[in-house]
Amino acid sequence: MSSTPSSVENSGEQNAIAVTGHEPGAAGQEPVLSVRHLRVEFPTRHGTLVALDDVSFDIAPGEVLGVVGESGAGKSMTGNAVIRLLEPPGRIAEGEVHLSGRRIDDLPEERFVPLRGRHIGMIFQDPLTSLNPLFSVGDQLIETIRTHLPMNEREAREEALKLLREVGIPAPENRLDSYPHQFSGGMRQRVVIALALAARPEFIIADEPTTALDVSVQAQILALLKRLCADHGTAVMLVTHDMGVIAETADRVAVMYAGRLIEIGPVDEVVRNPQHPYTKGLMASIPGIEKRLERLYQIEGSMPRLAAIPAGCAFNPRCPHAQERCRVQRPDLMPAEGSLAACWLHDPVDPLPPRRGEAGEEMAHVR
Amino acid sequence: MLAFLIQRVLQAIFVMFVVALISFSLFHYVGDPVLNMLGQEATEADRAALRAQLGLDQPVVVQFWNFVVNAAQFEFGISYRSARPVTDLILERLPATLELATISAIFAVVMGILLGIYTALRRRSWLAHFIMTASLIGVSLPTFLIGVLLIYVFAVELGVLPAFGRGETVDLGWWDTGLLTTSGLRSLILPAITLGLFQLTLIMRLVRAEMLEVLSTDYIKFARARGLSKRVVNLRHALKNTMIPVITIIGLQLGTIIAFAIITETVFQWPGVGALFITAVRFVDVPVMAAYLMMIALVFVVINLVVDLLYYAVDPRLRAQGGGK
């Protein structure tokens, strides 16, 4: 069915490693969200594109999982697949999604709709376009509240006021009947958060919630999101390409590359001691105040297009350690120090010998 | 809001003034009506007398001024052909045209919006594909041909509907209606479809295109992500945003329905203002032509004004610019 060769090796017992492998930090509690071997395909005229391939992760109650990667790595795609808002013709081809222990990816659409907003919330990148310009903020809030909770118009209005107050909108009584264009960008994102949290979902997907905002407002919105989720025990999947946001907000980090999850672990581990060569390069390319450099470090080459993902490890053409095995066999997530990394360097049975002296390596250790 | 209204009304008056100028110039460029009216045996003195009676001996500026002042009071002089006041002629023909235009407009708008929504929401269904293909016919076939085809199928071959005329009408004193008799209603069906079909397909295609665009916006995706039902998302959130550009086009199209009624009225021998205009053109009956021109212009200007006000009602962003919350 698939046109990529990687899917051939990507079956059988190798999958078992990722399923049974305990992720640090997620152990102990039953996860709110559990994604197993998720595969998203886009059938096109020129063959099937695999946008997500064998993505597995858990999120514990109240936990913030940061998802990072370049544009097109599949970060937003993962969020959209979980809440089942993929743009057609995209579809979940394989894998399972469990919410609080209940499988949700195979529910018929009419039974999935009530989950959105009630159990899974979502916040989008651009608050300027996330609100319907023709309805007042109050209308949109009341409508959302009444969709999920058994309240009459008046009670819902009270609840809407409470929500606006909670997200820090001053004098909400006066703002409830205002239209979105009468709010600033930061205020609109607060409204969006209020809408997403209106029915107190246990899990929320925040898709680059601060990217479109002024830097000075970003920190406020992140702090707000973090506080609200901590108060209500809401788990968060925070999609971003900003490592600063991750370091600030997330408990664990998942790094994505070419539609695959290549490293996942506690935020401190992944940021300070990255295990996958790609993550090392990613961390090394972040500018810092303390190090003065002529040029910023960059990883040679660029991420492959979905139509041309190489066989074996997707990163092998750019990897300083790549060897024959990397070009043939695709690595699954394997325990690596405090994290899990999808790299043959960490093969518990037969680890690949790393090559020394590569720039990314050096830089990463300097940090 | 008031300033906006005043500004729009002033603009409308200006447009009407320009149209009046064009209508008036008709009197001077389509030949000498006096020659047509009196025939060949008239003497020079007869002609001068008629010229004076019609006010054609006065300076052009004075004539124009008189024309504008009279037009403002719906006074367009005497028809050269029937020697009756033009206003009376138009008023007695107007109900037929307005009933035809209103029914076909309702047909076009209601069906256009419904089909537009359907084809946007069920984009991939075979019925939507069929409707879209069929709509090409409505867009590309000329009105008179559609009329003739409908007459051929429903009047000649099947013999179920009348081919021409208005059927029986009921005189309400000030309004002569065909809507109250069965034969009047039956007579209305074919001309109304003929007149409305082009508008229907246009509105449908526009609604579909706008709706598809709105459905791909972030706020629709966010509305879905909040768990709102499909119905609420499609028919409340998406439709309202779709209607903003659609209102403009519908408004303009309503004007063209009245203007294009000429062709349909000719095909179906419908006793309306359009047919009156065609006769007037044939006989160089300039006052009737000028009055018709002014009437159509007025219809367009009024509709545009209403459309602008509707924007205000639909889009809160415009309200805010006008001052106040």
Image (cartoon, rainbow, N blue to C red):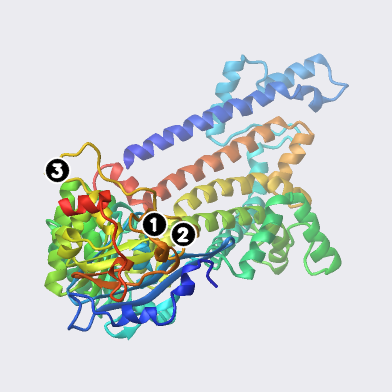
Name the one closer to the observer, A190 or A134. A190
Q: Is residue A67 visible?
A: yes
Query: Which residue, given by chain and number where applicable, does mark 2 sit on?
Result: A306
Circles 1 and 2: CB distance less than 8 Å?
A: yes
Q: Check the image and report above or below for A337 versus A15.
A: above
* Mark 1 or mark 2, whichever is nearer to me: 2
Which badge, 1 or 3, comes first in the chain's sequence?
Answer: 1
The residue at 35%/72% (across/down) is A332
Side of A361 relative to B142 (left or right): left
Label 3 vs label 2: CA separation?
35 Å
The quadrant in which the N terminus of chain A is found is bottom right
Label 1 vs label 3: CA separation?
29 Å
Local secondary structure at mark 3: loop
Are labels 3 and 2 assigned to the same chain? yes
Label 1 vs label 2: CA separation?
9 Å
The residue at 54%/51% (across/down) is B250
Q: Looking at the picture, how far across and down is residue B24, in whole percent?
A: 62, 26
Are labels 1 and 3 assigned to the same chain? yes
Amino acid at the residue labelled 1: Gly
Query: Which residue, given by chain and number where applicable, does mark 3 sit on?
Result: A291
Q: Point out the residue furthest to the bottom here.
A: A102
